[in-house]
Amino acid sequence: MVDTNKLRGAIYTEYKSISQLCDVVKWPKHKFTRLLQGAQIPDANDISILRKALKLSPSEIIDIFFAE
């Protein structure tokens, strides 16, 4: 389960908006919205892209995408 609060916090630490992040990672905004709503599960490639774009450590990304 994705910890959306931590994910949003990480986004707004690095970017002014979700749209700005989407521009950087070259994703349509609806893809990211589906990830935040739980309608789409990120694959390993998606998680890797976000980890790099958000400048997160492996442990931080695990806390976000593999929350209990």
Image: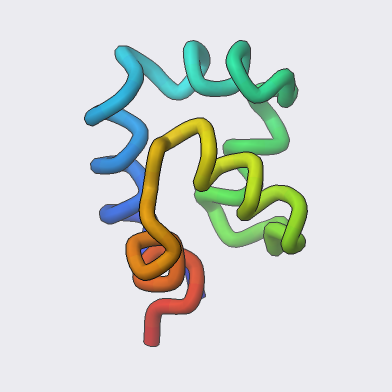
Residue 40, percent from left and from top: 71, 57
Residue 26 higher or lower than 31, as above or below: above
Towards the viewer: 14 or 37: 14
- Residue at 51%, 49% (x, y): give it: 36
Residue 31 falls in image quadrant: top right
Residue 3 higher or lower than 48, as above or below: below
- Residue at 54%, 53% (x, y): give it: 37
In the picture as drawn, the residue positioned furthest to the bottom comes out as 68
Q: Is residue 2 left or right of residue 24?
A: left
Q: Is residue 1 left or right of residue 48?
A: left
Towards the viewer: 41 or 24: 24
Residue 60, percent from left and from top: 34, 62
Q: How is the image coloured?
A: rainbow
Q: Quadrant of the C terminus?
A: bottom left
Residue 11 higher or lower than 23, as above or below: below
- Residue at 35%, 71% (x, y): give it: 63
**How many numbered marks appear?**
0
Towards the viewer: 46 or 8: 46
Residue 37 higher or lower than 20, as above or below: below
Residue 28 falls in image quadrant: top right
- Residue at 59%, 61% (x, y): give it: 38
Residue 41, percent from left and from top: 70, 63
Residue 46, percent from left and from top: 70, 49
